[in-house]
Amino acid sequence: MDFNRAELKAQAKELVKKNYWQVVYAAFVLALIAGTLAVNKEAPQTAENTYEKVSALGLIVAFIIAMASIAFRICVCLPLEYSGKAFFIRNVNGDARYELGEGFRKENFSRVISTFLLRDIMTFLYFLLLIVPGVIKYYEYRFVSYLTADHPEMSGREILDLSSKMTNGSKMNLFILDLSFILWNMLSGITYNLAGIFFVFPYREQTVALTYRKFVEEGYDPTRPAAGTVQY
């Protein structure tokens, strides 16, 4: 689907201004999670490089740390991701309630973990093939987190399938949307993420949520009416 990036980004700026501190807080938590994941991804490489230099006890300790890191990723980061994404789609409708523990609720916790874990495993497996298939799979599942919040009645497999259908033919447009933030990301980098925390991250997250909303309104989610106000 073609969409007007400039229009969506202008709307995102207005939503950020309207509920500024709530948006900044939610985006900061999401950015913090992403930073945690980046550290975790480097762990296997470090362990491999030092394998022959550590004792058996050191290997056991490293294994325990790795398992604890994976458990933290699954049981803490994934529910926090859900809470943040749910906030940004609610904010589209003027509901600025950010509930940090939303993903940890009994009715959400197991569903969020199973769905997001399936998404991450599938994406990782495609990255093992080559970078390009992994990137394609990443954009294929771009709406999984929003759909999980929007469709509590669906299983993880159904959510992934629906995201695949919604993004079919639109992955390049979603990729270009991300590229349109490259200068903003550079600004964030040269300001040691100060610009990122207080504007770039909220702006980017809200734009992606608005893009999802646009797909729903255009009828790309067949379970919802097209061209109407979507309630979350």
Image: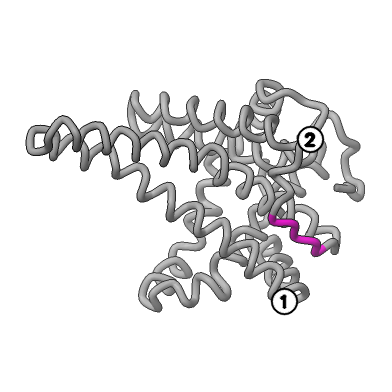
Residue at the location (16% across, 30% down)?
Answer: 56
- Observer able to see residue 211: no
**Which residue is disc 2 drawn over?**
107
Residue 41 is left or right of residue 193, and the answer is: left
| Pointer 1 or 2: first along the chain | 1
Viewer-proximal residue among 171 and 31: 31
Q: Is residue 65 in sight in this rendering?
A: yes
Q: Disc 1 to disc 2, how far (Cα)?
A: 32 Å
Q: Is residue 54 above or below residue 7?
A: above
Instruction: Tell me the kind of residue under disc 1.
Output: Lys
* Secondary element at image label 1: helix
Image-quadrant location for residue 190:
bottom left
Give the residue number, with chain letter if any, for mark 1.
17
Q: Which mark is residue 77?
A: none
Nearer the observer, 56 or 72: 56
Q: Could you tell me which residue is drawn at 63 percent across and 44 percent down?
A: 79
Counting from the top left corner in percent of width and height, residue 187 is at: 42, 74
- In percent of width and height, residue 181 lies at 50, 62
Three-letter amino acid code at disc 2? Answer: Glu
x and y, in percent, of residue 83 in the image: 69, 50
Magenta run includes residue 195: no
How many other residues sit within 10 Å of disc 1, few (<14), some (14-19) or many (≥20)?
A: some
Q: Residue at x 69, y 60 (%)?
A: 8
In the image, what residue occupies the spot 38% across and 30% down? Answer: 127
